[in-house]
Amino acid sequence: MAAKKAFGGYKISFKGRSDTVEDVFGKGDLAPSEMTKKLWVYIKAKKLAGK
């Protein structure tokens, strides 16, 4: 069975990253929507997303 195409056509690779979850999200409590925003900021800053 062939692998499914990534949703929305994006491929994100965290291969070789040594950042912790705390590095990405910080130490405080976050709502899920804020986690998503911070994750995308990290992905874009590190140029991890590709189509």
Image: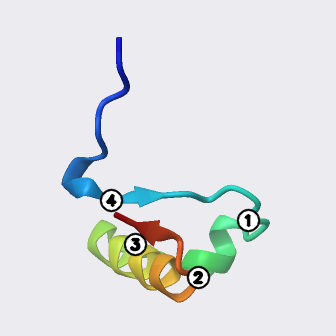
Secondary structure state at the residue bearing disc 3: helix
Question: Residue 15: x and y, percent?
Answer: 68, 55
Q: CA distance from mark 2 to mark 1?
A: 10 Å
Instruction: Give the numbered dot on residue 7.
Output: none
Looking at the rendered structure, which numbered label has been put on residue 46? 2
- Amino acid at circle 1: Arg
Q: Give, as a three-letter code, the residue at label 2.
A: Lys
Closer to viewer: mark 1 or mark 4? 4
Alpha-carbon span between mark 3 and mark 2:
17 Å
Q: Which residue is tagged 3?
A: 35
Question: Could you tell me which secondary element the residue under label 2 belongs to?
Answer: loop
Secondary structure under tag 4 reads loop
Q: Quadrant of the N terminus?
A: top left
Inspect the image, locate mark 4, and give the three-letter code of the amino acid beneath it: Tyr
State left or right for residue 38 relative to residue 25.
left
Q: Residue at x 58, y 82 (%)?
A: 46
Who comes first in sequence, dot 1 or dot 4? Answer: 4
Q: Amino acid at mark 3?
A: Met
Locate residue 44, reporting x and y percent: 46, 83
Question: Is the residue marked by circle 1 packed among few (<14), some (14-19), or many (20+) residues within 10 Å?
Answer: few
Q: Position of residue 29 (x, y in %)?
A: 48, 75
Name the side, left or right, on which 18 lies relative to 46: right
Give the number of the disc on residue 10: 4
**Which residue is depicted at the point 43% across and 81% down?**
38
The mark lying in front, picked from 3 and 1, is 1
